[in-house]
Image (cartoon, rainbow, N blue to C red):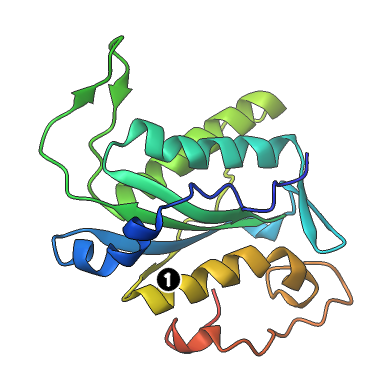
Amino acid sequence: MENSGDGGRRVLSTAQIDSIAALRLCSTGVYFITLCVQHRRSLFGDVIDGSMVLKNLGEIVATEWRRTAEIRPNIVVDEFVVMPNHLHGLIVMEPLRRGVSHTPGGKFRSPAQTVGAIVRGFKGSTTRLINELQGTPGVMLWQRNYYEHIVRDDRELQRIREYIANNPAQWALDRENPEEGVYQYAPTDGIEEIFGGIRP
């Protein structure tokens, strides 16, 4: 199935976008996260004509990423893209009162208050679901570490959103692309300025 083009982004209103800087002053954080598949295996789909076409495993990853906001009341999932062997995503983390919350019907909602806890939960659920589907219990899906960047202002937020949205079109130049003959150099979009001289 082909991505809808919005990267699965939960659309924020103009007022929400305009107030992100003010919200962050009240302990809200906006984070850019990158997760890579172990050994850079291309498991999640293919880039065809500059668009990401997800396979079944990629659909699982996209669904679980969206569920992050459903099971964690303090999280808003913003722009994201599932690539053949990695995921880029933006999350907004709002302050949360201590304790576990339950939705009507008794559904558990996680009180995760750190990016690390969110990433651990996401990696754990996707690994379990994919290993169950493939009959490969105990196989590592993701690399141990992940990349995290705190978004400092609205201008940076917009540039990172563009970077995520354009990622499939840049796949031929992506250093995460394991295909032979790929140019293995990054486009000159200046995104490294945001990320301290590196390209996530």
Residue 119 screen position, x and y as percent: 40, 49
Q: State left or right for residue 8 relative to residue 45.
A: left
Residue 186 screen position, x and y as percent: 68, 84
Q: Of 24 and 32, which appears nearest the observer? A: 24
Residue sitting at the far left: 98
Q: State left or right for residue 46 relative to residue 105.
A: right
Corner quadrant of residue 81:
bottom right
Residue sitting at the far top: 105
Total labels: the figure holds: 1
Above or below for 2 versus 158? above
Query: Disc 1 designates what residue?
Result: 157
Q: Of 144 and 11, which appears nearest the observer? A: 11
Q: Can residue 37 be seen here? A: no
Q: State left or right for residue 189 relative to residue 72.
A: right
- Number of other residues with Cα within 10 Å of mark 1, as a class: few under 14, some 14 to 19, many 20 or more: many
Residue 94 screen position, x and y as percent: 23, 50
Quadrant showing the N terminus? top right
Residue appearing at x 48%, y 33% in the figure = 125
Residue appearing at x 58%, y 47% in the figure = 8
Q: Can residue 195 be seen here? A: yes
Q: Of 33 and 13, which appears nearest the observer? A: 13
SS at mark 1 in the image: helix
Residue appearing at x 39%, y 54% in the figure = 91
Q: Of 48 and 60, which appears nearest the observer? A: 48
Quadrant showing the C terminus? bottom right
Q: State left or right for residue 7 relative to residue 116.
A: right
Corner quadrant of residue 102:
top left
Residue 85 screen position, x and y as percent: 68, 56
Residue appearing at x 27%, y 61% in the figure = 29
Above or below for 131 versus 61? above
The amino acid marked with disc number 1 is Leu
